[in-house]
Image (cartoon, rainbow, N blue to C red):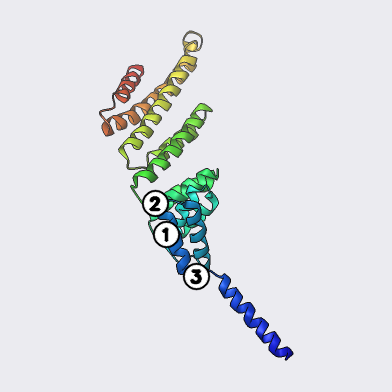
Amino acid sequence: MRNLLVLLSFCFLVTNLFAQTPDPAKLKSEGDNALKAKNYAVAFTKYNQYLKQTNYQDSITAFNCGVCADRTKKYADAAKLFDVAIKKNYNVASAYIGKASALRNLNKDSEYLATLQEAMQAAPANATIEKLYAIYYLKEGQAFQKAGNLAKAEESYKHATEVTSKKWKTDALYSLGVLFFNNGAVTLKKAAPLANSDAAKYEAEKKSANDDFQKASTYLEEAVALSPERAEIAKVLGQVKAAM
């Protein structure tokens, strides 16, 4: 009798356990319906339960769940879910964009940049990925330029020229041109008082400034060739030529 009671209790527990485990197909269907209704919180919950039960094998649902996570500001979950889609080679460009956006919202700058670098290789010439990549390096270049770090600013701006986008490549070349034009102008201005007191040093500083002007001219000429319709670039190029 005691053994029978134990067996019955065990059977009851197993039956109860299965009764409490939602059917994966039902969860997915409920998630799909919630997504169609733009009820992202419910869709995320249903999809997330479904994915956990199915060991994240469904790349399409992982992507959709990532979208829902992003819409409900669950950025850590979004990054993880978009990564599932990336690894399963589903909607790769959009998954990289989603993952990068989530990491940016989490203020994970190094991971954000690494994701963009991977995305540039995985989805070359994608307009959104190139835009995010170029903007990252243009902003970084501006920060270095403001801090007076010419070498690091140049390095960042050069990274921004790696894109195929006409607009962003032109912006990067223009930034490089302005960077060296400004630096040459500052060098020449500081050297001016030396013209009468230390001719040798003045000539050395003047040469340094002219080297910067030459670099500026080269970058700006590339920018003009790429985007001849942008009058502001041609105007600065003219100023550089006049200063040389």
Label 2 to label 1: alpha-carbon separation: 19 Å
The mark that comes first in sequence, 3 or 2, is 3
Query: Is the residue marked by circle 1 packed among few (<14), some (14-19), or many (20+) residues within 10 Å?
Result: many
- Residue 41 in the image: state x and y as whole percent: 50, 52
Give the residue pinned by disc 3.
23
Amino acid type, label 3: Asp
- Residue 228 in the image: state x and y as whole percent: 25, 29
Label 1 to label 3: alpha-carbon separation: 14 Å
Residue at x 34%, y 22% (from the top left corner): 236
Q: Nearer the viewer, residue 239 or 27?
A: 27
Query: Is the residue marked by circle 2 packed among few (<14), some (14-19), or many (20+) residues within 10 Å?
Result: some
Q: Secondary structure at mark 1?
A: helix
Residue at x 64%, y 77% (from the top left corner): 13
Question: Which residue reaches farthest bottom?
Answer: 1
Give the residue pinned by disc 2.
94
The mark that comes first in sequence, 2 or 1, is 1
Q: Secondary structure at mark 2?
A: helix
Residue at x 50%, y 31% (from the top left corner): 143
Give the residue pinned by disc 1.
32
- Left or right position of 16 against 239: right
Q: Is residue 31 above or below residue 244?
A: below
Q: Nearer the viewer, residue 161 or 56?
A: 56
The mark that comes first in sequence, 1 or 3, is 3
| Nearer to us: label 3 or label 2 | 3
**Placement of the C terminus among the 4 image quadrants:** top left
- Residue 85 in the image: state x and y as whole percent: 43, 59
Label 3 to label 2: alpha-carbon separation: 29 Å
